[in-house]
Image: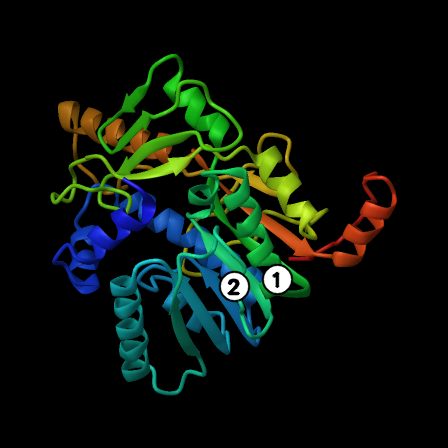
Amino acid sequence: MDAKSHYVHQAHHGRTYQEAHKSRQEAVTKPLREYHNDVKNRLIHRFSREVEDHLDLACGRGGDAWKWVGARIHHVLGVDIAPSLLDDARERIDIIRQKKPDHDLTAEFMESDALGKHDIEWGQTFDTVSCMFAAHYLFESKESANQFFENAAAALKEGGYFYGTTICAKRVLALLGKEKEYRNSVLLIKALWDQPSKFGSGYTFALANTVTNHSDEADDVEGGATEYLTFFSVFTKLAERHGLYPVRDLNWSFGRNKRSRRDTLFEREPADHQEAFRYFQPQFCAHPNSQEQGDAAEADNGLLSDLEKASRLYAAFVFQKDTSRMKRSASDDGQPVAQRAKLNA
């Protein structure tokens, strides 16, 4: 199922976002979702704290709204393909206004499926642009991936940061091995290609109790949306063609969040030798007060191992807009120009 059909289905599935939130609080994937939210929270606070204008691509139900408030962002434009999800996002903002009337955040939401199809007239530029857990949908073709970067770069101010999270093609391929399908207790991946290639290599991806899953039941895993293999070297080359460059010497430790016990979110070395990316480094563990033993403890450890396998498919990325470097590179017969853009923690 293509991404738009899948997420429109999700939006009309009969559960409000409050009901979905309650269900997820009770689901077996809760440790994974808490960790992924921690990743997003620290990325937002690191790069968008106190910015004037932020653009969130594929914002869904506005699940990061409280993170925007915490980061003291002044204004956010959220874009998504499913109008009903955006209705939930608007409701979320209304609830925030009721609970925290003194906050400064303003937000608006725009329905669009043009991100990978044609130029979007943003009407302004933004200090930062994010795309969380969605860039892999845009690698259906070289044209759609190029258009995605064109729209992201056009929306971003010079020197601004484009950041987010996506899934690694090489880790998907490693998990599949020689098989066409991989399944564990929380994850299902089905390859739809004959031979994997840089663009258009689709696969069905479903992670229990997340928006990727098509099942009605919280902890069941059933066919989900079609995603596309995303090779980080290809991602980087396309980004650079649009003036978006890896941020060199970035301290990826990010420090400990006061709401989290995690010291380290990411692996230290660049993911797949690409400077802009760092793999997720989840460290799930059983509850310290758990009295489970024997079969129960073994089952718990098996679940946590399955969650880690799913989470380690992902990486975070950070790019910075530098059109002057792009012009220098173009005039220098394509030879890379060294850049050191330090960002201290």
Work out which quarter of the rendered image holds the N terminus and state it.
top left
> Residue 252's spot in the image, x, y percent?
60, 47
* Residue beneath disc 2: 120
Say left or right for 26 vs 333.
Answer: left
Q: Earlier in the sequence, mark 1 or mark 2?
A: 2
* Residue beneath disc 1: 154
Tell me if label 1 and label 2 are in contact, CB under 8 Å. yes
Q: Quadrant of residue 50?
A: bottom right
Identify which residue is drawn at 45% across, 83% down.
Answer: 104
> Residue 246's spot in the image, x, y percent?
67, 47
> Residue 152's spot in the image, x, y percent?
56, 57
Q: Is residue 327 visible?
A: yes
Rendered position, 267 above or below 180: below
Alpha carbon of mark 1 to alpha carbon of mark 2: how far? 9 Å
Q: Which of labels 1 and 2 is toward the front?
A: 2
Question: Badge 2, how many Cα within 10 Å: few under 14, some, many 20+?
Answer: some
Q: Is residue 264 visible?
A: no
Choose between 33 and 152: the one closer to the eye.
152
**Helix, strand or loop for disc 1:** helix
Q: Quadrant of residue 181?
A: top left
Identify which residue is drawn at 35% across, 34% down.
Answer: 310
Q: Quadrant of residue 143?
A: top right
Say left or right for 140 vs 158.
Answer: left
Identify which residue is drawn at 54% across, 68% down.
Answer: 121
Rendered position, 223 above or below 137: above
Choose between 226 and 222: the one closer to the eye.
226
Work out which quarter of the rendered image holds the C terminus and state it.
bottom right
Q: Amino acid at mark 1?
A: Ala
Question: Badge 1, how many Cα within 10 Å: few under 14, some, many 20+?
Answer: many
> Residue 264's spot in the image, x, y percent?
51, 44
Q: Amino acid at mark 2?
A: Ile
